[in-house]
Amino acid sequence: MTTLSRVSLVLDALAESRGRLSLSELAVRTGLPRSSVHRTIQDLEEELYVVRTPGRPGYALGPGILKFGMAGHLHLLSANRGRLVSLARATNENAELAIFNGREVVIVDQVASPARLRGVTKVGKSFSLHASCIGKALLAALPPARADELLSPELERFTDTTITERPELQAELDVIRRVQVAVDIEEHDRGICALATAMTGPTGALQAIAIVMPTARFAAKSTAALDGLTVLNPAIDVVGAREHLEQKKRAGLG
């Protein structure tokens, strides 16, 4: 394994953790020998990519990472802004850009419709991977084993339609992998529905783009929303995606 691979494993483990990690915990999460983790951490500490706080055990990401994160974030937003604007105008609904944030998914940009959804979706808000179309779209873009690793042992229920059984979720992810579109009918928030597709964006990063709207408008506008996503992602299986959408609408909207 190369030095870069070891560095990537350690930084990924710290990014996905909700708290600080000890050398032993990092060794378990990365599968690396503790001695290799120690040497890697020492190198990262010198550049302030990881830090320790006196009196507190473990390591966390440090300020040295920010120069990469800020530049990458601005590049990501500028590369996708035109897409979001076009999608929001075509559908007259909120268009959102999302990426992985450890074991969650976070909205990093949004173009709001004139009848914007206040208090539900906003830039910086995180969602569970299993209970949102952006999360399911991103999970389905990963190899199944990796997607399974990112899921929490217990799938939290947010609404009556949240998928909380792993076999059911895995079956839906299989469909999303095939059709390239994920559907959320009130699975995270009552009164809110959405469609999303995941793709490697202009920056080379895996991202999801979603159209979000009130449930009251979803039945009438979901097909147009799907058409808008298809323009952005030519890999979408249009026939299969429409079938998946209609199945979800029958199950969720009655």
Image: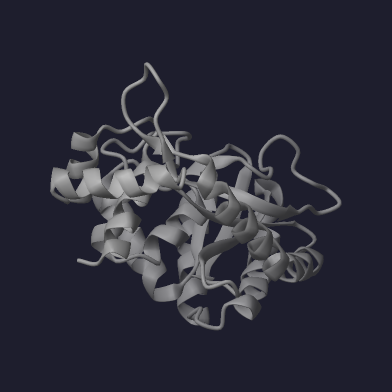
**Residue 47 screen position, x and y as percent:** 45, 48
Does 45 sit left or right of 83 as displayed? left
Residue found at the far top of this picture? 55
Q: In terms of depth relative to the viewer, which is nearer, 30 or 232?
A: 30
State the image coordinates of residue 147 (x, y, percent, origin top left): 31, 56
Q: Residue at x 23, y 43 (%)?
A: 38
* Image coordinates for residue 233, horizontal then vertical, percent: 57, 77
114 displayed left or right of 172: right
> Could you tell me which residue is drawn at 61 percent across and 70 percent down?
226
Establish if 241 lies above or below 34: below
| Residue in view at x 83 percent, y 48 percent | 115
Left or right: 19 as drawn, with respect to 231: left
Residue 254 seen in the current view: no
Q: Residue furthest bottom?
A: 234
**10, 48: nearer the viewer:** 48
Position in image of residue 126 (x %, y %) = 54, 41
Q: Nearer the viewer, residue 159 or 90?
A: 90
Callout count: 0
Q: Which quarter of the figure has residue 179?
A: bottom left
What is the quadrant of the N terminus in the image? bottom left
Residue drawn at x 31%, y 44% is 41
